[in-house]
Image (spheres, rainbow, N blue to C red):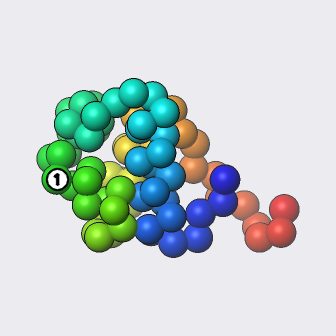
Amino acid sequence: MIVQTPAEFGRAVGARRRELGLTQEELAGVTGVNRRVVGEFEAGKITVRLGIAMELARSLGLDIELRPRGR
């Protein structure tokens, strides 16, 4: 999946969390952030630091790949 906005990234994280059967509270605990941060991030309401976004993805078994467009 290619995401182009923070809101799309948040929706992708939420979808993966639900796919794994995790609550926002459980993901927050694994990631080391507040549950509110996870909820607002998934809803596209906040843009978090890159480190937190990367940790959320890692906690859900997702990779972040940077590559030239069109490939």
**Which residue is painted at 16% across and 53% down in the image?**
36
Q: Is residue 59 positioned above or below 33 on the image?
A: above
Q: Is residue 49 visible?
A: no
Q: Identify the residue shown where x is 77% and y is 70%.
A: 69
SS for tag 1? helix
- The residue lying at 57 percent from left, 42 percent from top is 63
The image quadrant that residue 29 belongs to is top left
In the rendered image, residue 13, in percent from the top left (x then y), is placed at 44, 48
- Give the farthest residue toward the top: 21
| Nearer to the camera, 65 or 2 | 2
Q: Is residue 65 left or right of residue 33?
A: right
Decide: is 48 above or below 35: below
Which amino acid type is shown beneath numbered disc 1? Arg
Q: Is residue 28 visible?
A: yes
Decide: few, some or many residues near mark 1? Use Cα within 10 Å; few <14, some 14-19, many ≥20. Answer: few
Q: Is residue 66 left or right of residue 5?
A: right
14 or 70, nearer to the observer: 14
Residue drawn at (58%, 70%) of the image: 4
Q: Which residue was labeled with disc 1?
A: 36
Image position of 24 with respect to 37: above or below = above
- Tell me which corner region of the image, top left, top right, bottom left or bottom right, holds residue 18: top left
| Furthest residue toward right | 71
In this rendering, the answer to whether 29 lies above or below 67 is: above
**Quadrant of image for the C terminus:** bottom right
Q: List x then y, in percent, for residue 35.
A: 18, 46
Q: Position of residue 2 (x, y in %)?
A: 66, 60
Total labels drawn: 1
